[in-house]
Image (cartoon, helix red, strand yellow):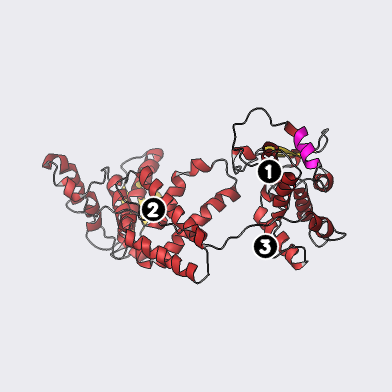
Amino acid sequence: MGLTLDRGRYYFVLNVPKELFGKVVGRNGQPVRQIRQALKTADRSVAKRKAFALEELKRAEWQLLRLGEDALAYQKYEAAKQISESHGFEYIPSDVLLQRSFQDNLPRLKAAAGRENNPPPPEVANAILGGVDVALPPLRIVLSEYIALTKTKHIRKSDRQRHLWQLPRERAVTNFERAVPKRSAVGIDKITRDDALKFRDWWGQRIQTGETRAETANKDFGHLSQLHREWCELKGHTGLENPFAKLRFDKAIDPLVTRPPFSRAWIQSKLLGQGALDGLNAEAADALLVMVNTGLRPSEILSCPLDDFCLDQDIPFIRVAAHGRELKQRHTARDIPLLGTSLAAAKRIVARGGITRYLHKANTWSSLVNKYLENNGLKETPAHTAYSLRHYVEDALLAAGVDDRIRADILGHKYARPVYGSGGGLKMRNDALNKIKL
């Protein structure tokens, strides 16, 4: 945007983009490379305000010119809305305008006609008069709008958690576009049940060949169904049928996959064996060892600030709290006693200044540790992972006869019965973990 002062009066000046040379014309009907318009003021602040409004208007007009015939219907509609609003009119489709009185439409007609010696481009007049069909956005733009519309739901998530929430939804849209490419650019209202069934068939073929699992496909169906339903509710398009509803495969067709627990003997002889973890960096190794006697999730350990390693208490413990991230469930917030191997590892973490390298990076940690376990013969079976330590703690507590309420408190599980009191607090958790400590 440019302002120029000429004989005490301000003028608005804006260069025409190269790709629009020949399409933008002046008052004489000839193409121009620069537009210049009197702002009819000597006050610079007033001139800047007028120039800003003019620039918004011109850029909206040029966007419609730039789109051309090959543009998406939604892009044309959005540009037409912006132009109409920039001229001071709500965008109203032409068939609705035709039902209104001539007197009501007169201001629009005058704006669309322009001045005798300087009529607006046909695209601009068409926008003011509602000549562009109303169009809903395609699925990918719906996703972008949905993310923006629901951002307050994710205030408690860390940046990493927001990324991980967004990623599978983007993947679901990408998979749909890959499976049904002809629908990637059409409005969401043009996606039919047949399109959704083609998407389901695309997944079905991959499941049959063993390339993927029904559970994976069902996640895509769930994400797209939720996206369609909630976007329509927020935007007021509640009359649209949801083509992605009830597409799910029966999960029973998937082979059963479970994470087995490590045996106590394996942990003692292998994971805690002399030099077993020497090839891991100290922070990664100690985080793994904290799991041994606590059953904590890796993300719970790796999100703890230094202050939540409470080692100077009568019963040393680690505090699981939100700390800039969203907890899996409210009941996962808890204090877990530290004993034996886990206490020694926590002391080393604190001595180094806390978790730094893998702070809020549980996935990175898991990839590294699981690869290390595999490469060094530390997996009891191919199905075992670092997370199997959590299952070991759960099984060990059960075998030791620990009350189910206390087990739930230690592991951060939801307790199915009505909850009264503290469940015994830190001391009873400490007594329970003391029965299984290594």
On screen, residue 362 versus residue 117, left or right, reads right
The residue that mark 1 highlights is 411
- Indicate the position of residue 312 as horizontal and vertical percent values: 83, 35
**Mark 1 surroundings: few (<14), some (14-19) or many (≥20) residues within 10 A:** many
Residue displayed at 67% across by 62% down:
383
Is any atom of residue 206 visible in this view?
A: yes
Residue displayed at 51% across by 52% down:
166
Q: Secondary structure at mark 2?
A: loop
Q: CA distance from mark 1 to mark 3?
A: 21 Å
- Indicate the position of residue 19 as horizontal and vertical percent values: 36, 65
Q: How many marks?
A: 3
- The rendered magenta stretch, by its main secondary structure, is classed as helix
Q: Which mark is residue 383?
A: 3
On screen, residue 239 versus residue 374, left or right, reads left
**Mark 2 surroundings: few (<14), some (14-19) or many (≥20) residues within 10 A:** some
Q: Secondary structure at mark 3?
A: loop
The residues colored magenta run 427-434
Is any atom of residue 115 visible in this view?
A: no
Residue displayed at 44% across by 52% down:
144
**Mark 3 surroundings: few (<14), some (14-19) or many (≥20) residues within 10 A:** few
What kind of residue is marked 1? Leu
Q: Secondary structure at mark 1?
A: helix
Q: Residue 210 lies in magenta, yes or no?
A: no
**Quick one: label 1 or label 3, which is nearer the N terminus?**
3
**Quick one: label 2 or label 3, which is nearer the N terminus?**
2
Q: Which mark is residue 245?
A: 2
Q: Given this view, does label 2 or label 3 mark the residue nearer the observer?
A: 3
Q: CA distance from mark 2 to mark 1?
A: 34 Å
